[in-house]
Image (tube, rainbow, N blue to C red):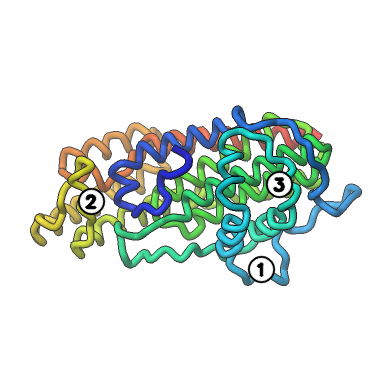
Amino acid sequence: MMGGAGEGVCIMMNRVCGVAVGLALAAAMSAICACEPQGGLGGGGGSARGGNAPPPTAGDPAESGGNAADVYIEVYDTLGKPLMDSIANGQNVDAKLAEHAGDIERMVVASGWKRCDFGVNWSEGLNAMMPHVGKMRRVARILKADATRLLAAGDKDGAAKRIAALLRISDQLTREGKASIELLVATAIAAMASEFVVSNPSLAEAAWKTDIQQAIAEVQGDGLLNSAAVIKSDFEIAARSLREGTVPDTSEMGGWNWATVSQSERDALADKLDAIKEEAVKAWSGPGAAGALAGLGQRAKDEGIGEFVTSLDKLRTSMDRLRGDLDKAGAVLAKQ
């Protein structure tokens, strides 16, 4: 599940076989805390600062014009699949993580940059490929495993920096995000970070805990991970693809061969999708959101456009859970 879903797959394939995959992914990401080793053999690699002075901002001002996505993918390629697989399998990789401390620190710094562009060709609509979502799940695991290593070695500041980076990465994924799969992955990553804080209250003693607190505030901004804007864009991509005739053939996965559907039929379906979009965006932040969104999902199925509409009620429920997780993490950090 963690290895392949979403990696090298277009938006539509994630949508047809993958909204359920994505939601299971969110649960799986949260479960990582329970299956990865908690001990650590290595030390060091953490913050070089000491004392009780407040930490500086995470991004290096001299590098803030860079593209964080380039750093993540470069480090992802450097660390390699064997290390990724070992982390996924719950093996102790402390020695390897210590060896790559400089690479991991580069990702921590990049998480503070404003620009994070993975180069998705959004003009391809539902055919747009999104390999970065799978890669960023693995990047998240690396940062979480390294935080575990550093905390076990007594480096609370180093661990705090990496947990703050996880939260900032989740924010980067959705700051300019356009697809629900990005929001799903961002939600799972932020939940992982929150769980780590709740499970390790000693982080409240770290001087760098303020870095986590600032990152929590960033995630909670813009209606929590810029979620309403992402949902709106998700609908717009689908409607545009219908009108332009660029919807992939999903008949082998229970969908339709859209090349056989006439322009007039596709236009009519796109109009229906636009109407549901307006109601979904309005309901997203309103009272009883999950129930209203479930109703819109059923309406989409009844109108023949169910495969274009993410399970928004389940996604909204997972985000409500994330909001509670963030509040718990904030409360833990506020105790010292």
Three-letter amino acid code of the residue under disc 1: Ser
* Residue 259 image offset from top left, x and y in percent: 13, 58
Dot 3, how many residues are within 10 Å of its Cα: few (below 14), some (14-19), or many (20+)? many
Dot 2, how many residues are within 10 Å of its Cα: few (below 14), some (14-19), or many (20+)? many
Q: Is residue 224 visible?
A: no
Callout 1: helix, strand or loop?
loop
Callout 2: helix, strand or loop?
helix
* Residue 79 image offset from top left, x and y in percent: 62, 53
Mark 1 → mark 2, Cα distance in angstroms: 39 Å
Res. 333 image quadrant: top right
- Of labels 1 and 2, earlier in sequence is 1
Mark 1 → mark 3, Cα distance in angstroms: 25 Å
User: Who is closer to the viewer here, 43 or 229?
Assistant: 43
- Of labels 1 and 3, earlier in sequence is 1
Res. 280 image quadrant: top left
- For residue 328, side relative to residue 230 (left or right): right
- In the picture as drawn, the residue positioned furthest to the front comes out as 82
Mark nearest the camera among 1 and 3 is 3
Three-letter amino acid code of the residue under disc 2: Leu
What quarter of the picture does the C terminus occupy? top right
What quarter of the picture does the N terminus occupy? top left
Q: Is residue 173 visible?
A: yes
Residue position marked by numbered label 1 in the rendering: 64
Callout 3: helix, strand or loop?
helix
Mark nearest the camera among 2 and 3 is 3
Res. 121 image quadrant: bottom left
* Disc sitting over residue 273 in the figure: 2
Mark nearest the camera among 1 and 2 is 1
- For residue 145, side relative to residue 187 (left or right): right
Query: Residue sitting at 60 percent across and 29 percent down?
Result: 35
Residue position marked by numbered label 3 in the rendering: 97
